[in-house]
Amino acid sequence: MIHKDLVLYHDRGGIQDKETFLENTRKNLCSDSNKKPIHKVRKESLEVFPLYNDGVLYGVVQNGIHDFYIREPNKEDKHTGTAKFTHVYLLENKEWILKEVLSFDHH
């Protein structure tokens, strides 16, 4: 679930709102089914920190590193890069909603 006021800060792609993020996802991640970009989180890098307001959980901060791959039919995934991320999820109406994204240190 993505918040209606999502803000993504990307060290190569600039600042994106929800509409731009979804448009870029369709254009870049969903455009060629024969060369599909894949993100894999390094499990050992994942950290999650709760956010409380007067003892009530309202969100979490998630940090980690993900690796990027290109997946082609009948081939092993090809590693194409690495980046760090920070996500802020808010708990709204018992659902976790992605509100803020930092995507940085792309290699």
Image (cartoon, grey):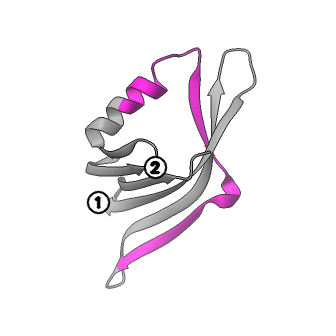
In the picture of the structure, the residue carrying the numbered disc 2 is 11
Q: Position of residue 18 (x, y in %)?
A: 29, 42
Corner quadrant of residue 80: top right
Given the current orientation, which residue lies at the most extreme right position? 76
In the picture of the structure, the residue carrying the numbered disc 1 is 92
Q: Amino acid at mark 1?
A: Glu
State which quarter of the image contains the C terminus.
top right
Q: Position of residue 69 (x, y in %)?
A: 64, 33
Asked whether 62 or 67 is in front, the reply is 67
Question: Is 20 on the left-hand or right-hand side of 73?
Answer: left
Magenta stretch, residue numbers: 24-52
Q: Could you classify mark 2 by the number of other residues whose Cα lies within 10 Å: few (under 14), some (14-19), or many (20 or more)?
A: few
- Tell me what residue is drawn at x 36 percent, y 83 percent: 55
State the CA–CA distance, disc 2 to disc 1. 28 Å
- Tell me what residue is drawn at x 73 percent, y 15 percent: 74
Label 1 SS: strand
Question: Is 17 on the left-hand or right-hand side of 59?
Answer: left
Q: Position of residue 51 (x, y in %)?
A: 40, 74
Chain-order first, disc 2 or disc 1: 2
Say if 34 sits above or below 30 in the image. Answer: above
